[in-house]
Image: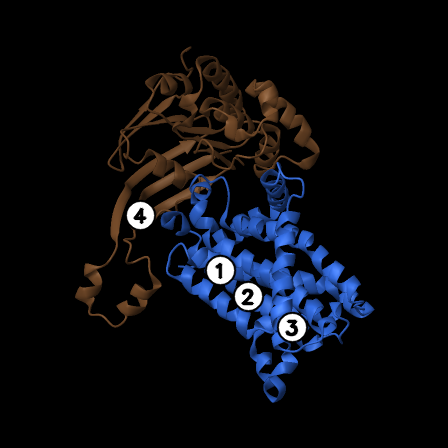
Chain colours: A brown, B blue
Amino acid sequence: MAEIRLDNVGVRIPVFGANSKMLKSVLVGFFRSREQRESTSTVVVDALTDVNLTFSDGDRVGLIGANGAGKSTFLRVLADVYYPTSGIFEKVGDTRCLFGLNSGLEMEGSGWDNIKYQARRIGVPKSRLDEVAEEVADFSELGKALDLPVRTYSQGMQVRLSFGVMTSIPADILLIDEVIGVGDASFMEKARQRMLKFTDQAKILVLASHSPDIIASFCNRQIGFEHGRVVSDVRTADTPSEL
Amino acid sequence: MFEWKRASAVIQRAAATSDVTWMIASNGIKYRYKRSVLGPFWITISQAIYILALAVVFGGLFKMRDVDFIPFLTIGILLWAAATACMQESSTTILHRGGELKDGANNCVSLVLEVVFRNLIVFLHHIVVFVCVAIYYKVHPNVLGLLMLIPASAIFIINVFWISGILSLLIPRFRDLEPLVFSLIQIGFFVTPIMWHPSLLKEKEYLIHYNPCFHLLAIIRDPLLGEAYPFVSFGIVSIMAILGMAAYYFVLSRTVTRLPYWV
């Protein structure tokens, strides 16, 4: 069973100026008056404010909103990367995330090497590594390109590889940022099938995208963000429409 | 303020994926030297030339016999270079690869472990220089010392690891620590007996016992040079390893949740 619960969750990100990044300024700060200290203090950005949401098994959530609305920050909270600075965040279930296109990829390494690195990182046991690698290679349709260094890959090829690995063994919660959108049409259909299979085995999918098509075809719930707040939460058709 | 649970979770993850970290570190060296015949041995040659230059100048200055000085200098330089390379690279690894932390693709302990592993592998290439020197000057390591090399190396690596780890966590927050650390390493090189033999201090020889770097080098260097095993140094650096790892855990628990905001 997978469950995510957020109660009044807020994330305030400190943005340190060049000066407050220095140990010197902290030490000097001890000898300064409060006014002087505040004038050089850091700017704080409210990236998320008062988020109240509950996700449970079977939820395929699409996050929508303008750039900077808080979608990625929200995903990072769910992934335990950003720690909420206020409110309560509870999560049950293993989490798998796919946020950056090339994050975690060793650019000089071959496709095969990278499949193995990432597969091990998400917990594929050594004994099943070759079998999983074959399956991912098959899904990615990268063929001979898998022998080449990943730095030679296009974005679409990178996402085929990373997405393939991330969905190769089941997890309770799958979090995907924009990246999926760089795939071509045939990949999107394959990805959708694979994701449905993946989310069938349970659980929760949360996906951020600017593409209404992707959201409509992958998700059964849409959450809108604006300036770090949730502004809409709509349940849509339970069986996603065909692409 | 202290996120012990989170810190433990990160350590667990880093330990569970340490085999991947090792693979990435060793393959990283292979990729880097893919198009060269000698591979990392190129750097070994440059290290050898560096040691030779220092040997000629300082051996002459201090009027030491080559047989006493050159093996001593060689192993000292190699160990010092490996340890400080770890600290310097770790200082910036999180700053440079913060994206991987923000994307949840890696964790801050694995990044440091990767640096340590990579430098360990490079060091194992460089050790050839010492082997050649030791054979040429007929150095006889003692048997007990060679056996002690296993725990001593482990303790040496643990000490390098916790120092590198703490630096990697603090420098993203306090950027001016980085040049400070670099100068400290510089100073450390001169005040630690690497280029000069402790006996040169004569009646002030006791002073070097206050230098932790000296003890750290001694546990590996002394037995390799055939000297009596420095059990006192071994005890001191063992305690240092335990306290240091505790300190690393402490700093990690203070910084682990804020690190993604700093990079």
Q: State the quadrant of the N terminus of chain B.
A: bottom left
Q: Is residue A211 found left or right of B216 in the rendered image? A: left
Residue drawn at the location 42% of the way across and 57% of the way down: B171
Given contact means CB atoms under 8 Å apart, are the residues at marks 1 and 2 in contact?
Answer: yes
Residue A14, relative to residue B202: is it above or below? above
Q: Amino acid at mark 4?
A: Ile
The reply to whether residue A166 is in sight is no
Q: Which residue is mark 3?
A: B59
- Mark 1 or mark 2, which has the lower sequence index? 1
Callout count: 4
Same chain, labels 1 and 4: no
Residue furthest to the top in view is A242
Q: Residues within 10 Å of mark 4 (few under 14, many from 20)?
A: many
Q: Residues within 10 Å of mark 3 (few under 14, many from 20)?
A: many
Q: Residues within 10 Å of mark 2 (few under 14, many from 20)?
A: many
- Mark 3 or mark 1, which has the lower sequence index? 3
In the drawing, what numbered circle is on residue A13?
A: 4
- Of A118 and B97, nearer the camera is B97
Q: Position of residue B60 (x, y in %)?
A: 64, 74
Kind of element beneath mark 2: helix
In the drawing, what numbered circle is on residue B244?
A: 2
Residue A104, relative to residue B9: is it above or below? above
